[in-house]
Structures are given as structure tokens and as C-alpha cells.
Image (cartoon, rainbow, N blue to C red):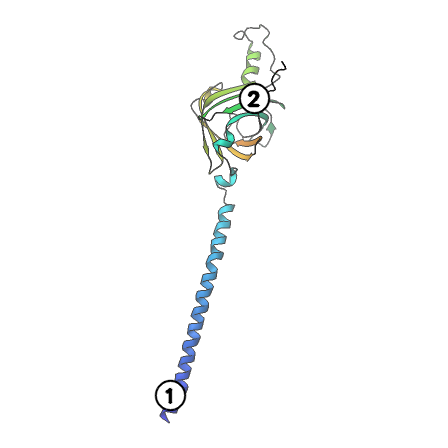
């Protein structure tokens, strides 16, 4: 009788142990499958963060930037939301990025009036103002942050003296074999500058 009394309890305990093991296995299984899900969520959140990588164009390298680029358009969006083309609707200019890490930049308005006196140092106040506002020239060295998709110009000298000795960042938003677009978040005029450039092509040789 005693033996028959213990068998049901023993079977019940065995059943409880089996159920506990099953629940533990299920819990571990759920934890295992939850980890990839958490990793995916973390990756998604990282992409959504406003990091410099998210702003800058991926695939940027010095090799892709080296060469001479012709300015196609330059538009300043001022802090009040208005937009202006400081070098006119058809700016003339180039930036040359050399393989040795040096650069040269020139931008001009094509409609700058000529100096009436024909003396470069003898312009009137109005004529000099037009030249000062319509010409930007600078040179120095540059560096590329491939991870962030940015170009930094280390200005040695500039026709706008406030730029001399400064570092100017360009956030590259698009780059291809012959087209380059970037923004300048700290331009000489308060706001943001949006520039589009085309790779300059070698001029055709003069016919013999």
C-alpha cells in the first residue's frame, strides 16, 4: 500500500520537473531568437541618428575628388529662409584638388563691371565694392574624411581675409565621375551654401 501511495506523487513530481524543464527550454529559445531582433532594432536606430555619416555621402575618397571641378551653381540659403546666388545665376570658377593634398579655388561673377580708369589700383569705391563682392580666391591644403563624407579646406590665404588661417568644411551630398555636390554649413555669408560642380574637361587641342 505504501508503495502504491508514493508512485502517484513521484509521477507528479516527475511531471512537474518535466514541465519546468520545458518552460526553461522555451524561455531560452525565446531569448535566443530575441537577440537578433534587438540587434536589428539597434542598427535601425543607428541609421536614423543625425550622424555625420548620415549627412555626408558614402563612398567619398581623395582619389575620387582629385582633379579640377567647375562650379555650376552656388546658392546661399540665409538664416531667414531666403535664397540668393552671390556669384549670379552663372558663376565662373574652379576648385583644383591636387593629389599632393593642396588646393586652389577661384570663383567670380561674370558681370563685374570693368574699372573705368583701367587702373587696377584706381577703381572707385563702387567699382572696388563690386570686385570685392564678386570675387573669391583662396588656396591652401585639404583633407578628406572618408567615413564622414566630408572635405575640409585648410585656408592658407583668401581674398576674403576673414577666411585666412581657418578650416572650412564641405559636406559632400553627392559624387559621381563627373558631378559633385556639397553644402557649406559655415560660409562667409550667414546661412548654408549649396554648390554643384562638374568635373572640368580638358579643352580640345587647337587645329593644326
Residue placed most toward the observer, 80 or 112 = 112
Residue at image coords 55%, 13%: 128
Residue located beneath label 2 in the image: 93
Question: Is residue 131 in view from this perspective?
Answer: yes
Position of 169 with respect to 91 (left or right) is: left
- In this view, which residue lies farthest toward the bottom? 1
Mark 2 and mark 1 in contact? Answer it, CB < 8 Å: no
Nearest to the observer: residue 65 or residue 42: 65
**Residue nearer the viewer, 155 or 75:** 155
Residue 170 visible here = no
Please tell me the numbered disc located at residue 6.
Answer: 1
Position of residue 169 measured from the top left corner of the image (x, y, whole percent) = 48, 30
Q: In this view, does 2 lie to the left or right of 47?
A: left
Task: Give the quarter of the image for residue 117.
Answer: top right
Whole-percent x, y for residue 7 in the image: 39, 87
Dot 2 falls on a residue whose secondary structure is: strand
Task: Look at 48% across and 34% down and name the residue there.
Answer: 61
Tell me the CA gap for discs 2 and 1. 98 Å
Query: Is 5 drawn above or below residue 77 in the view shown?
Result: below
- Horizontal and vertical percent position of residue 89: 63, 24
Amino acid at each position: 500500500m505504501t508503495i502504491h501511495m508514493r508512485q502517484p506523487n513521484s509521477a507528479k513530481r516527475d511531471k512537474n520537473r518535466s514541465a519546468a524543464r520545458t518552460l526553461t527550454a522555451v524561455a531560452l529559445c525565446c531569448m535566443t531568437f530575441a537577440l537578433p531582433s534587438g540587434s536589428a532594432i539597434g542598427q535601425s536606430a543607428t541609421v536614423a541618428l543625425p550622424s555625420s555619416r548620415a549627412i555626408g555621402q558614402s563612398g567619398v575618397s581623395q582619389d575620387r575628388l582629385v582633379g579640377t571641378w567647375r562650379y555650376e551653381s552656388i546658392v546661399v540659403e540665409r538664416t531667414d529662409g531666403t535664397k540668393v546666388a552671390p556669384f549670379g545665376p552663372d558663376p565662373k570658377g574652379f576648385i583644383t584638388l591636387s593629389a599632393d593634398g593642396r588646393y586652389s579655388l577661384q570663383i567670380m561673377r561674370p558681370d563685374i563691371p570693368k574699372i573705368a580708369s583701367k587702373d587696377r589700383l584706381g577703381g572707385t569705391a563702387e567699382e572696388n565694392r563690386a570686385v570685392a563682392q564678386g570675387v573669391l580666391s583662396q588656396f591652401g591644403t585639404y583633407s578628406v574624411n572618408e567615413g564622414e563624407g566630408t572635405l575640409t579646406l585648410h585656408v592658407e590665404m583668401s581674398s576674403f581675409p576673414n577666411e585666412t588661417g581657418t578650416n572650412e568644411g564641405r559636406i559632400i551630398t553627392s559624387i559621381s565621375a563627373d558631378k559633385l555636390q556639397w553644402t557649406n554649413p559655415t560660409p562667409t555669408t550667414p546661412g548654408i551654401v549649396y554648390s554643384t560642380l562638374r568635373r572640368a574637361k580638358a579643352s580640345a587641342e587647337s587645329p593644326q
